[in-house]
Image: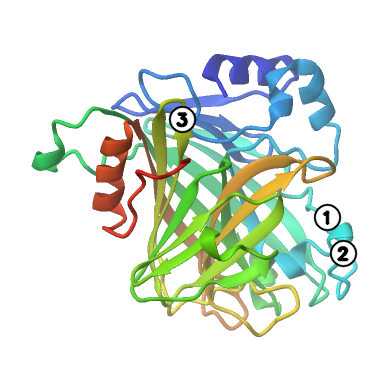
Amino acid sequence: MNFNKLVQTLQEVGKATELFTSPDGSRVLVLPHGARIVGLFTPRNDENFFWNHAALERPETARELYESAWHNSGGNRTWLAPEVDVFFPEYPNVDLAGYRIPGKFDPGNYRVVKTADSVGLASRFTLHFYRTKQEAELEFTKAVSSAPNPLRHERDLRGLDYEYGGLTQITTLALVGDSANRPVQVGIWDLLQLPHGGDLFVTTYTRVEPKIFIGRIASDNLIITDHAVRYRTRTVGHEKIGVRAVVGTGRVGYCYPAGDQLALVIRNYFINPSGEYVDVPWTELEDLGYSMHACGVSIPSGQFKGEFTELEYHAPGIGAGTGCKSHADTSQLWAFRGSRQVIDTIAKRLLGPECGVEQVGR
């Protein structure tokens, strides 16, 4: 979505935004409503790298969106895991019809915190855990700052013609007071919605079969090589895969057609296999250890309406049995736009030789 249209629509429906501009000109649009990063833009292009809900094209439909059950503006959001503990009030019933998004953090109530080199959001709230029948008071912060182009010192790539936009994201979560002594585990869960119909790459240290959490994925849309999983998001409906922390490198990319060019968005994040990754499949509660998920979503109506690909990762959890009362997570988003040949070169440099993109969208 275009930068000016997005800002104008949000303004007209009473949703204030904050703009962070990096020294290199990268622009990051922050929406306190829901603690979202709704846009990432290069210095010379007003087209968003992220997916935004089509309702934000017009104020009339945007108002309807913000009166619905889920205020899904699109872009980046941060939820909390385990999903089965936090999103199913009727647990152990985990039917999707009973899925409820906790208003305590989405849309939540966030205050803006600015420094000379960052824009951040902060909140404090009490969250109910339905599986363990516990409550915990939590402090949450999320801030964006600059992320210089990771290729800036690569001499052999200096002649490439492309656009770059980037950001660093720092997210913190802490148990407050007596909540640290309660039998709860909770972790940061980061989700990024991107335009549908591209190829998602999970880089791995060894060959691995991803876990299918939701749906059935055609074999030609899930391609496994020695050091990568390629997930082609062509779904109608809802699909979800997961990869465990012990094999993930901490670098995931998604490439999709952008007019006559390609766009490539890479999440660079830290994996600690010694940490407790607390999210689990809804009916396999002992299957711990997943640090990365990806979803393909094409749903025409209802609470989860939209057509997007979702790149997700988890940070190690805090609370009972983890040895931690708080966690600070730092990650980067690097986004590139250019010709097929150029983006293919960049993808192979940052993700590995098995992650070629010249056939994306064909």
- Asked if 233 appears above or below 33 in the picture, the reply is below
Identified by mark 2, the residue type is Pro
User: Residue under circle 3?
Assistant: 258
* Horizontal arrangement in the rendering, residue 105 relative to residue 334 (left or right): right
- Which is more N-terminal, label 3 or label 1? 1
Which quadrant is the N terminus positioned in? top right
Label 1 crowd (10 A; few <14 / some 14-19 / many >=20): some
Q: Position of residue 109 (x, y in %)?
A: 71, 40
- Which is more N-terminal, label 1 or label 2? 2
User: Residue under circle 2?
Assistant: 89
Marks 1 and 3: CB-CB under 8 Å?
no
- Which is more N-terminal, label 2 or label 3? 2
Q: Position of residue 240 (x, y in %)?
A: 63, 61
How far apart are the two marked residues, 1 and 3, measured between alpha carbons? 34 Å
* Horizontal arrangement in the rendering, residue 335 relative to residue 37 (left or right): left
Q: Position of residue 81 (x, y in %)?
A: 65, 65
Residue in the picture at 68% in, 73% down: 281
Q: Nearer the viewer, residue 357 or 108?
A: 357
Considering the numbered disc 2 on the image, is that residue within a helix, a strand or a loop? loop
Marks 3 and 2: CB-CB under 8 Å?
no
Which label was assigned to residue 100?
1
